[in-house]
Amino acid sequence: MLHKKKYKFLLLAIVLFAGICSASTLKKWTIDDILRTEQLISAEISPDGKYVFYQSGFTRDGYPAPPSKFQTSSIRSGEVVELDIRYALTSADPKNKLFRWLPDSKWISYFANPAKQSTTVQVYRISPTGGKPQAVTHAMQRVSDYVWSPDASALLYVTVLPPSAE
């Protein structure tokens, strides 16, 4: 199963690369062309192998390109859904794991800061088929890390303690 997932992801990467290469043979690229080119930042296959969640961005917004588009693609049908992810904490480094599949593959969870204040960072989730994001945590302090139970029925999270009065 893991071999199939890697194969499908490799095939998706080749298709994206081929599209970029075919477009680049039409004319010589300029710096402006490079800045307008969408870049794949990270991709992760769902635990059940049905979807790929990926983030992309543009170099014109900074280097390395910060994520600005969040999408899922059905591995079976190829249908692409752009996710309405607002206020998400993002990073150009995919090792940060700011976006995580739930073990049951029904949701993608992530850190969000809807009030744009560091003390209100919470965990949100969104369906890979789209829809409105849902708050998962409502902690009084900033959530700094979390992990899902193997059956996705429970969430363990860590918050940052406020400064003590002492």
Image: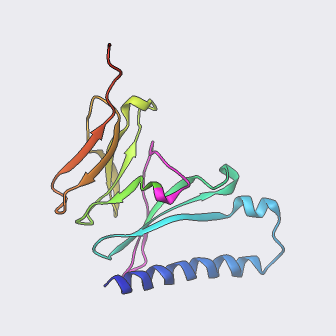
Q: Position of residue 166 (x, y in %)?
A: 32, 13
Q: Position of residue 29 (x, y in %)?
A: 81, 70
Q: Position of residue 143 (x, y in %)?
A: 33, 39
Q: Position of residue 85 (x, y in %)?
A: 43, 50
On the rendered structure, is 152 left or right of 127?
left
In the image, the segment drawn in magenta is: 73-95
Q: Quadrant of the N terminus?
A: bottom left
Q: Main secondary structure of the magenta part?
A: loop
| Above or below for 102 versus 20 | above
Residue beneath the point at 33% across and 24% down: 162
On the rendered structure, is 129 left or right of 64?
left
| Residue placed furthest toward the top | 166
Looking at this view, is 22 or 121 the one in front?
Answer: 121
Q: Determine if the magenta segment contains residue 56.
A: no
| Above or below for 49 versus 147 | below
The picture quadrant where one finds residue 158 is top left
On the rendered structure, is 132 left or right of 15?
left
Looking at this view, is 151 or 116 the one in front?
Answer: 151
Residue beneath the point at 26% across and 44% down: 157
Residue beneath the point at 24% across and 64% down: 103
On the rendered structure, is 62 left or right of 109?
right
| Residue placed furthest toward the front | 166
Residue beneath the point at 50% across and 82% down: 10
Q: Determine if the magenta segment contains residue 86.
A: yes
| Above or below for 125 versus 48 | above
